[in-house]
């Protein structure tokens, strides 16, 4: 069966990669596409990051192509250093694929991807909107937009907090699969509310941000004074917060969590 698309490819490529390669493809795909290129790209995107080498048979299964076709394309990609073959016939991504990835990361404007979504969330709720990244058992605020109330936060961008205190950290732990009844409830609801947990004066609602393949990238948090943000008010803000987290995951696309972590130093 063809490998299922993750949703992060451009629309045309996503449709092509999930289609069964056949003679019918030329009649259903845009004229400007080249079928051989699409098939080659399907091999490169068959690597999901959990394995170093893939046998030829597994590449054929994930791409939905016959093994001789995969072998011809893999050898071509190998000649261009996008793949590296092993003596037993297995393949891994090559240095050219890494170079393309590094160029993508170098050109990726995190501010342009994150700030508009946080501003829209802040405008919708009237409260402070923040994006947290994490490493190990620590989290840090990568970006924040103040709400209409204009109450300035005492948290400095880059300041480090534990994951197990405050909703922004707890949703990350739950998304990472941390066991426990509280984390199970967070996973079912898709958000978490805390009031005065990390800071007695602050209440918040947060949702985890997931990138490609469900990778946990961080969390989005809506927060403000505990006096104003009752549990009922925070529940009303939950859908907007969850939506912002989903949009951030889509905006960041295939950006690895390590690229986000490189923006701060725990």
Image (cartoon, grey):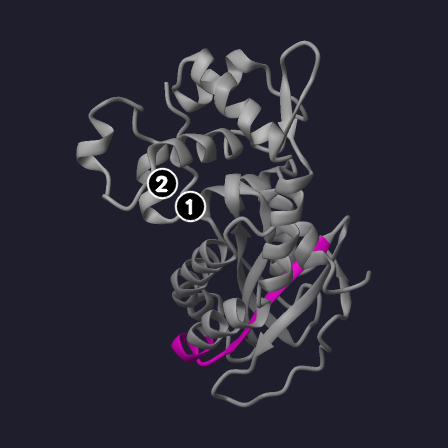
Residue at the farthest top position: 88
Residue at (47% x, 49% y) in the render: 190
Residue at the farthest right position: 266
> Quadrant location of the C terminus?
bottom right
Position in image of residue 169 (x %, y %): 66, 56
Residue at the farthest left position: 27
Q: Is residue 110 visible?
A: yes
Residue at (59% x, 47% y) in the render: 216
When the figure is inspected, residue 83 is found, relative to residue 188, above or below; the finding is above
Q: Which residue is mark 1?
A: 9
Question: In this orientation, which residue lies closer to the viewer: 56 or 81?
Answer: 81
123 inside magenta stretch? yes
Q: Is residue 185 visible?
A: no
260 inside magenta stretch? no
Q: Tell me if label 2 and label 1 are in contact, CB under 8 Å.
A: yes
- Disc on res. 51: none
Badge 2 density bin: few <14, some 14–19, many ≥20, Cα 10 Å: some
User: Residue 200 lies in what quarter of the image?
Assistant: bottom right
- Disc on res. 14: 2
Position in image of residue 7 (x %, y %): 40, 43
């Amino acid at each position: 069966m063809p490998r299922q698309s993750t949703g992060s490819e451009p629309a045309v490529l996503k449709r092509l990669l999930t289609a069964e390669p056949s003679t019918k493809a030329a009649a259903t795909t845009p004229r400007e596409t080249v079928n051989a290129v699409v098939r080659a790209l399907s091999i490169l995107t068959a690597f999901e990051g959990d394995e170093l080498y893939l046998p030829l048979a597994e590449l054929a299964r994930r791409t939905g192509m016959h093994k001789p076709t995969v072998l011809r394309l893999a050898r071509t990609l190998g000649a261009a250093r996008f793949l590296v073959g092993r003596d037993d016939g297995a393949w891994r991504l090559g240095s050219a694929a890494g170079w393309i990835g590094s160029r993508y990361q170098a050109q990726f404007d995190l501010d342009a991807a994150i700030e508009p979504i946080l501003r829209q969330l802040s405008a919708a709720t009237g409260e402070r909107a923040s994006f947290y990244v994490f490493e190990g058992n620590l989290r840090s605020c990568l970006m924040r937009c103040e709400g209409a109330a204009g109450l300035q936060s005492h948290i400095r961008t880059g300041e480090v907090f534990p994951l197990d205190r405050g909703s922004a950290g707890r949703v990350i732990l739950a998304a990472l699969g941390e066991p426990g009844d509280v984390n199970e409830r967070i996973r079912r609801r898709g958000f978490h509310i805390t009031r005065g947990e990390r800071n007695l004066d602050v209440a918040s609602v947060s949702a985890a941000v997931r990138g490609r393949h469900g990778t946990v990238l961080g969390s989005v948090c809506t927060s403000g004074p505990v006096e104003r943000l009752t549990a009922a008010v925070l529940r009303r803000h939950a859908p907007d917060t969850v939506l912002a987290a989903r949009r951030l995951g889509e905006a960041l696309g295939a950006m690895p969590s390590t690229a986000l972590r490189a923006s701060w130093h725990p």
